Image (tube, grey):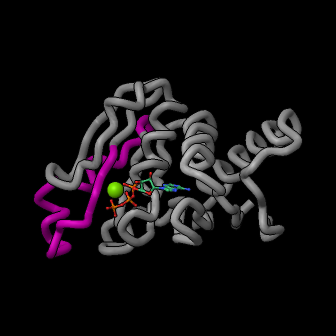
Amino acid sequence: MDCLDLILSSRADTDLLGQAIGQALKGGEVLALIGDLGAGKTTLVRGIAVGLGVPARSVSSPTFVLAHEYQGRLPLTHIDLYRLTDGRETDSMGLAELFTDHSVAAIEWADRFPACLPEDLLEIRLAHRSPSTRNVSFRALGPESSALLTRIAELLRKRTSHRPRGKITGQGKASTR
Ligand SMILES: Nc1ncnc2c1ncn2[C@@H]1O[C@H](COP(=O)(O)OP(=O)(O)OP(=O)(O)O)[C@@H](O)[C@H]1O
Ligand SMILES: [Mg+2]
């Protein structure tokens, strides 16, 4: 699957989506989080961390240190490019070395320096819909991220079949290669 659009009706939905993503990860994936201030990027990463077995309270925005590492079922590197002003700073912070086969990278404001990112990444765009709801659009840019998106969709599908009135609603825009 290479595209999926969902509506998140509450912060709890964003958290649950993050948990499904965390459960679907196998290591080596790069998640490019894109969206305005307050769109829910950090909230989603907190859910992802929980899905990997990291306590939610240990997750905070890495805006001032650029990267945080959490140790769960897989190592999770949480990066925030918001304050970087120059793409060359990504060299000095060793951004490329943070992308490893066994860990997962979640990058807030990934669209600021796209050239610094690997090709095969899962783009996750969050957008305000109302004060408490968000649109989320996934786009897989390579085979690994496409396989990840398929696993995420499968977990969400199983979950909603257990929870018939589940709130994470697809917009019928899933597509496969
Ligand atoms: N459906 C929702 N999903 C996510 N967050 C929501 C939702 N509804 C309301 N919120 C609120 O929106 C805010 C999202 O903040 P968060 O720090 O996750 O955004 P962000 O995209 O990381 O912002 P920044 O660009 O400043 O890093 C939180 O205060 C959260 O409670
Ligand atoms: Mg944030």
The answer to whether residue 148 is left or right of residue 41 is right
Q: Nearer the viewer, residue 174 or 30?
A: 174
User: Residue 174's spot in the image, x, y percent?
Assistant: 78, 65
Q: Can you see residue 139?
A: no
Q: Nearer the viewer, residue 175 or 159?
A: 159
Which quadrant does the N terminus fall into? Answer: bottom right
The answer to whether residue 63 is left or right of residue 134 is left
- The image quadrant of residue 39 is bottom left
87 over 14 or under it: above or below: below
25 over 29 or under it: above or below: above
Determine if the magenta segment contains residue 164.
no
Q: Could you tell me which residue is drawn at 49 percent across and 31 percent down? A: 50
136 over 155 or under it: above or below: below
Q: Could you tell me which residue is drawn at 43 percent across and 35 percent down? A: 102
Q: Can you see residue 80?
A: yes
- Which portion, as a residue range, is magenta? 78-103
Classify the position of ligand 1 by quadrant: top left, top right, bottom left or bottom right. Answer: bottom left
Determine if the magenta segment contains residue 94.
yes
User: Residue 137's spot in the image, x, y percent?
Assistant: 62, 67
Q: Could you tell me which residue is drawn at 75 percent across and 44 percent down? A: 156
User: Residue 96's spot in the image, x, y percent?
Assistant: 28, 55
Which quadrant does the C terminus fall into? Answer: bottom right
Q: Residue furthest front?
A: 131
